[in-house]
Image (cartoon, rainbow, N blue to C red):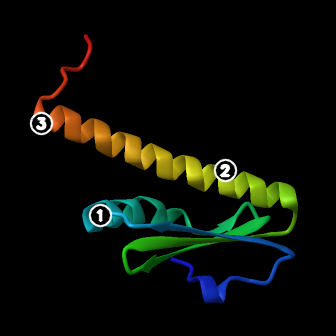
Amino acid sequence: MTRGNSLPERPWSATVRLRDLPEEKLDRLFRALGPETGDVAGKSTVALEREPGGVLLQVRADTSSALRASLNAYLKWVIMVDAVESLAETVATGAASPKP
């Protein structure tokens, strides 16, 4: 995984902190998104780091459009990981039956 302090300098950057997550959820999120870090199509670079109780997502990009695209992708992945986790918990507890 690319660490934030080793990201190449680029003119556009953003930092997102996801805080106050349960440790179990944090582990799954980090494992799911970690392999996706690094260079993104040569236009942006993404780093993901663990922090106490949270995750730090850093994006650096050559253009504002590349920054927006990378942020959108990673934030949608965060939402998707949470949705899949919630669905898996629901099915595992039998709280809802899958539709035929």
The CA distance from mark 2 to mark 1 is 23 Å
Disc ID at residue 56: none
Q: Which SS class for mark 2?
A: helix
Q: Which SS class for mark 1?
A: loop
Which amino acid does the dot numbered 2 rest on? Answer: Asn
Q: Determine which quarter of the picture holds residue 44.
A: bottom right
Residue depth check, mark 1 versus mark 3: number of the one nearer the observer? 1
Q: Is residue 87 above or below residue 57?
A: above
Which amino acid does the dot numbered 1 rest on? Answer: Pro
Residue depth check, mark 2 versus mark 1: number of the one nearer the observer? 1
In front here: 40 or 61? 61
Please give the name of the residue rendered at 35% of the width and 41% of the height, measured from the top-left corner: 84
Disc ID at residue 22: 1
Q: Is residue 16 left or right of residue 96?
A: right
Q: Is residue 69 above or below residue 42?
A: above
Earlier sequence position, callout 3 versus callout 2? 2
The percent position of residue 28, horizontal first and vertical second, equals 33, 60
State yes or no: discs 2 and 1 in contact (Cβ < 8 Å).
Answer: no
The percent position of residue 15, horizontal first and vertical second, equals 65, 71
The CA distance from mark 1 to mark 3 is 19 Å
The CA distance from mark 3 to mark 2 is 32 Å
Please give the name of the residue rendered at 19% of the width and 24% of the height, measured from the top-left corner: 96
Q: Is residue 58 left or right of residue 10?
A: left
Which residue corresponds to mark 2?
72
